[in-house]
Amino acid sequence: MPFAEILGHDRIIEVLRRSLRGGKTAHSYLFEGVQGCGRKKTALALIQALFCTTLPDDACGVCPSCRKIDGGNHPDIHFISPLPDKRDISIEQLREMQHELALRPYEAPRKACIIDPAERMSVSAANSLLKTLEEPPGNALIILLTENAGMLLSTVRSRCQLIRFAPLSPEHVLSLLEESGMAPEAAALVAPMAGGSLKRALELDNEALAARRDAVLSRISQLNVNRIATVFDAAEELSGNRDATLELLDMLLSFFRDAVHLGAGNGEIVNRSVRPAIESIATRRSLPRNLELLESIYETRRSVQRNANPKLALDHLFMVMGDGGR
């Protein structure tokens, strides 16, 4: 796949293309980011560009090497993941990989390996990989994928070039969902709730999410500190465990980002299927006030991530949100 097919990571793509043009790709990379943000797609695009027989810094998509990688059957690419009945990647798997990398490539100029998820390597397996990361046999390319580089041994991290992938924007997730064939209304519903992950977006329950979205919009439209019961009832109904509360806060972030866009004169929003409700949020308060509330929602999310009590955190947030139009 050409690099142009990867959305949301332009800076990373330019760094990789520059290294390809200069013949200075690293031996070992560590791609960090949430599942579904494009780490694996970028890893395959990098390998495809490296193996391409036509272009110097991208994949042409039509040469035999590019077609085999697109078809998932190139003999010089190896994938390492936990075996179906195992939790961890074993030392035996990595030893087999090291043996394969030491053999002459079948077709490509070098061999390549993707380890996913890298944090699932056992300690003994990770330690066995150190020399290979530092001096891959036959100039092989090794790419480790992880959600959290901090979960890997420091000795592994130090031997790789770390590239951090930001979560995809809701707009990019929306575009990818529509490209995959999802109906626009369904895509507009799940994209803001995906946390920057296409994988999570595809796994979300549209029907349940639509019901929760409507409940949230109804509750926040009634918030009023002069009627304190509206605040506490909303927090009681909408709070839950930590994950459910984080999902709620992601929903609120999406609503208020759209409201800020409308308030700033930008008519393009993500939550198109509930546009009247978003317009109501935008007109109820001034643009500066909606920007303040957007920051308050971000701060509440950070607090819940740091293990603040979800119900108390929402009580405080809804008090702030229910202060009327300013």
Image (cartoon, grey):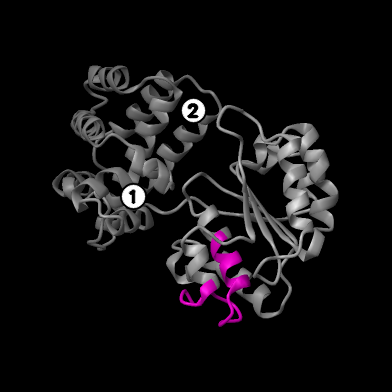
Say how many tags the image has.
2
What's the mark number on residue 304?
A: 2
Instruction: Please report the bounds of the magenta region as a residue range.
Output: 44-64
In which quarter of the view is residue 11 placed?
Answer: bottom right
In the picture as drawn, the residue positioned furthest to the left comes out as 276
Q: From what the image shows, is residue 232 above or below residue 136?
A: above
In-image side of 26 versus 240 (left or right): right
Secondary structure found at label 2: helix
Q: Amino acid at mark 1?
A: Arg
Q: As rendered, which of 275 and 78 lies closer to the eye?
A: 78
Which residue is found at the position 35% from the left and 32% from the top?
Answer: 248
Say few, some or many: other residues with alpha carbon within 10 Å of mark 2 (under 14 / 14 to 19 / 20 or more): many
Residue located beneath label 1 in the image: 257
Indicate the quadrant where residue 178 lies. Answer: bottom left
**Residue type at numbered disc 2:** Val
The answer to whether 290 appears left or right of 49 in the picture is left
Residue 179 location, x and y as percent? 30, 59
Give percent across and percent down for residue 165: 56, 54
